[in-house]
Every structure is written in C-alpha cells, then in structure tokens.
Amino acid sequence: MSTQISQQNLKELYDKDFYLWIQKNIELLKSKNFDAVDWINLLEELEDMGRRYIDSLISFMTIILEHLYKWEHFRIHKNMGNSWVHSILNARNHLLDLLEKHPSLQNKPQEFLETAWKSAVRRLISWFEKPENIPLAKKIFGKIPSQNDFPKNCPYSYQQIFDYKPWIKELDK
C-alpha cells in the first residue's frame, strides 16, 4: 500500500472504491502526511458516523413510543400486544446499551423525543394500512387514520421511554 496517490486521485477513489479510499487515508494519517489526506470526505464520513448513533437512538425510541401507544390505545383483547411488550423491552435494552457505551449521548433522547414521536406516528399509520389491521382502524377511527388522529406532541415523557410499563399495572388488577 506504499504507492503514492495524488489528492485528486484520492478524492476520485472515494466514489470508486470506498474501502481502498479508507485504507489510503489511514496510511496517510499514520505516516503523518496530513496534507495529502482527503479531509473534505473524511470529515463528512466522521460526521456521518456520529449521526448514525443519533439515528439508532431515534429508531429505538420510535419503537418504544409506537408500541407503548399501541398497548394503551389499540388492544382489543387481553391476549393482544405481547409482541409489543417484547419490542419495547428489546428496544429499551438496546437504547440503554447505546447510552452506556456512548455516555455523551445521555442528553440526546430528550432532545429527539418529538422527532421519535413523529416517526412513531408514521409507523402507526402504516400499521393500520396493513390489510389485517384495516378492520381495527375502521372500528377505532372509522377510517384509516392520518397524522391528525394522533396527538401532535408526544404523549410520553422522556422518563417513560425508559421505565413506563403499563402491562405490569394490568397484572396487579
């Protein structure tokens, strides 16, 4: 990997062979040849790496919010919703693992609560559009729901994402 590559060729390599682009930039960084590094694309990739953690955080929160809302509003019989509880618990574990592994993300769930809720609402609408759920949509809403049929603001608090367990209350009854 000792062949020299021009900065222009390195930038072209970014689109043609991403893996080789990474290897060449690592080689340049290790040899402290900082002037030859493709900084523009490297910085973009580093920013994207950081966004991936935020995207994961939002994704786990979305699953939790979607299934909490389903549990509280769309269970039509007692045996319905066990898979939702499983999804909530699984997403919580992943979310907690992510926050433990990357402590600087600790304040981010609160910052992205409304973003996650909007995503959860889109998922809820899609869920009602599935053929097997259309009768339930008609029973509850009289139609396939839209965004207007759900709370505009997230009905759950930041803390509820981590510890709210409405299914346990039902066990106490």
Image (cartoon, rainbow, N blue to C red):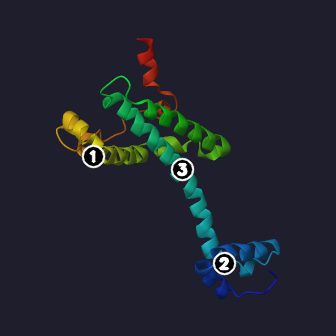
Q: Which is more N-terminal, label 3 or label 1? A: 3
12 vs 107: above or below = below
Q: Which is more N-terminal, label 2 or label 1? A: 2
Residue 131 numbered mark, or none: 1
- Dot 3 falls on a residue whose secondary structure is helix
Do tag 2 and tag 3 residues touch (Cβ < 8 Å)? no
- Could you say where residue 165 lies in the image, as x and y percent from the top left? 47, 25
The answer to whether 119 appears left or right of 43 in the picture is left
**Please, what is the three-letter code of the amino acid marked with disc 2?**
Asp
- Could you say where residue 66 lies in the image, as x and y percent from the top left? 40, 39
Distance from the alpha carbon under mark 1 to that under mark 3: 29 Å
**Residue occupying image coordinates x 63% and y 78%:** 17
**Residue occupying image coordinates x 44% and y 30%:** 82
- Could you say where residue 114 lies in the image, as x and y percent from the top left? 40, 44
The answer to whether 143 appears left or right of 59 in the picture is left
Distance from the alpha carbon under mark 1 to that under mark 2: 50 Å
**Residue occupying image coordinates x 22% and y 34%:** 140
Residue 166 falls in image quadrant: top left
- Which residue is tagged 2? 38
**Please, what is the three-letter code of the amino acid marked with disc 3?**
Ser
Residue 20 falls in image quadrant: bottom right
- Could you say where residue 5 lies in the image, as x and y percent from the top left? 73, 87
Q: Nearer the viewer, mark 1 or mark 2?
A: 1
Q: Nearer the viewer, mark 2 or mark 3?
A: 3
Q: Quadrant of the N terminus?
A: bottom right
**Please, what is the three-letter code of the amino acid marked with disc 1?**
Pro
- Which residue is tagged 3? 56
Q: Which is more N-terminal, label 3 or label 2? A: 2
Which residue in the rendered view is the most extreme toward the left?
142
